[in-house]
Amino acid sequence: MKNLRACFPYLFPAIILVLVTPSSVAQLSPSENRILFQVQKLLEYPQALQGWTRWTNLCFLPPSSSLKIVCSNGHVTELTIIGNKTSPSSHTPKAGSWTSLQTLSGKFSIDSFFTVMTKLSNLKVLSLVSLGLWGPLPSKINRFLSLEMLNISSNLIYGEIPSSISSMMNLRSLVLANNLFNGSVPDLQSLTSLEELNLGGNKLGPEFPSVGKNLVTIILRSNSLRSHIPPQIVNFDKLQVFDVSSNDFFGNIPSFLMSMSSLHSLNLASNHLSGNLSVNMACSSSLTFVDISHNLLVGKLPACLGSMSSKATVLYSGNCLSTKRLNNQQHPSSFCKREGALAVKPPAKKLQNESKSGAKLGLVIGIIGGAVVIAGLLVFLIVFIFRKSNGERSNHKMDKSVANKYSATASPRPNGHIPQAMKQATLGLPPYRIFTSEEIEDSTNNFDPSNLIEEGSQGQLYKGWLRDGSVVLVNCIKIRQKGLPHSITQQIEVLSNLRHRHMVSVLGHCIITEQDHPLPTSTVFIVFEHISNVSLRDQLADGRKREMLKWPQRMAMSIGIARGVQFLHTGVAPGIYGNNLKIQNILLDDSLNTKVSRYSIPLPSKSAHNEHTATNHIGSTNNAEKEDIYQLGVILLEVITGKQIASPSEIEEMKDELENGSSEATSVLKSVIDPSLRGTYAYESMKTAVQITINCLSKVSSQRPSIEDVLWNLQYSMQVQESWTSSGNLSTKF
């Protein structure tokens, strides 16, 4: 007893420490402990997460500049990991610039990563900065139901911001800066708790995002926004920081902007803002930073901005302002007027100078013109219905067996309308345009032979450089044909729709027609985007690169190819078939997205016009469609086995091996599959992909699946794989 009393002064502080320390903090739940170790593995053991062992109490790691873990009631509530991998900011990386020092390896799957991360369901703060994350941000990000602060800046995340982010109702801070996001920002008005929005350093645009009025910080600098400064900003009575610098904003600076009582920092630099600033403009006393430099502003600097220089930073060089202080850093007023006219072309500008009588005359002419157009449409509709009814009567005379065969084998074709999902797939491409002959000649250096890539049945293919520095491919096709102008015009309309993220897309065209007796000759120049990376064949042939392509990556590539083929078959009308699908014609961009190249160009034949009967046309279309499916099966065969195929006999041999493997023991199938895939695939996922590949390679063309069936099976295989990966089976060997 005496010994106990003697020790009590020393034990008392320890007892107090135990009592005041919640037991829930002292021990993280086993499931979340495992999740953190999975995160460590998926992030490929970054410096901030090294040194962990199974005895490490992750909740008691001392916070540092690169790692912070906060726990409560046995759950992780805050996780901050900051790496040292650089990001491309707002600049799209060039070929070879995504080095291993900047991104996670090719085996990284951002979808699998967030599947694991979202299991930390109690997270309130998540920061994943400069970790080399790459890929499109998954829509499952909204599974973070409790998340209040999300920061995934300075990575290489691309594509659109998922609309599901609008359902994260607890978000107070959203920071996606310095990535590769593009397209429009989803509607964020529903996020009423959002106070900070930082989307700077991406390629978002052109519309100003729709956001709530409770924002304190809006940072949208270095994007592709092109609009006026929205007038509703006046209602943002909590706004303190507003930065939209380095975009393409145009029009006047709203007079209310600088007088907003809550605003501290305003950055409008490097846009196309124009016009005069009101000399009597009021400036808020809370402003400490104003940057309106490098715009197209004219006139005098408002007095309130001039008087603020003692207590605030005010920058306004690079305009056309008449001010003595920075006169040597201002352009002449003619410069701003000229550049302003080029930056924005207002519609129907001449109408502004017309008199009232002219406006009335225009209205009358418009009404008359509208009546004529409507009458013309009615006549066209009557003729169309008459011809259609005649056509239907003649079609009934066709042989019934032919009609039955067509209805049984031909899948429905679109009527010229491109589905919205397919339109969205073209995001990130410049607008389609018609090039001049001078631009085509300049881009190829007058068709210098050193720029000639190949010459074949599809004409000559040149490498070229546009005036903005972008690299393109120019396909030159000469056509001599009866009725040429009409047929070329029709086909060119189809060319402008050949734009998809899983195809080497058409950027524009140029037509030069020469009246060469007896038939006119036209040269069609088709300008394609240039993909500077390697082909899928090259990637699989290189042993080291093939090792990086694990099953999830190969599945994603296969789905991309199928989507490109689906677009060719059903995304344009009429569908494009006979596309000479070869694995060496599947190109990979810098993000390893697959793009179908060298597909069939829907232009009139070089030879004389050939008339096809309905029967022959239907048969040739079906045959070409099924031939594309067979060729897609050959590509899938190489993806699964990792072996190059040089002859038709090899195709049959490997197909037979896959058939035997899928119908027998697991070990038999394992022996056929690329050895570098071991441990990275779910058996059911692989078996599904193998079966659809076998179906594509059927000798009987009518038994081959449609492209929709192929795509459905590949996507199902991917879903099985993701479920298997998220359950922690990545190291299981098959």
Image (cartoon, rainbow, N blue to C red):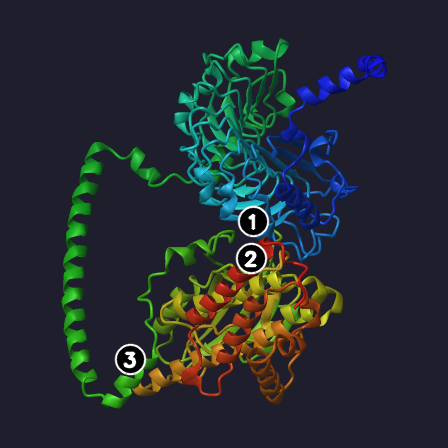
Could you tell me the amino acid type at mark 3? Answer: Ser
x 61%, y 13%: residue: 312
Q: Secondary structure at mark 1?
A: helix
Q: Is residue 662 above or below residue 104?
A: below
x 41%, y 56%: residue: 421
Choose the circle earlier in sequence order: 1 or 3: 1
Name the spot of residue 647 as percent of width and height, x first. Answer: 62, 87
Which numbered dot is residue 59? none
The CA distance from mark 1 to mark 3 is 43 Å
Report the residue marked by disc 3. 407
Residue 600, can we see it?
Answer: yes
Q: Are marks 3 and 2 in contact (CB under 8 Å)?
A: no
Say left or right for 362 vs 530.
left
Could you tell me the amino acid type at mark 1? Answer: Thr
Q: Quadrant where the N terminus lies?
A: top right
Name the spot of residue 258 as percent of width and height, x first. Answer: 49, 17
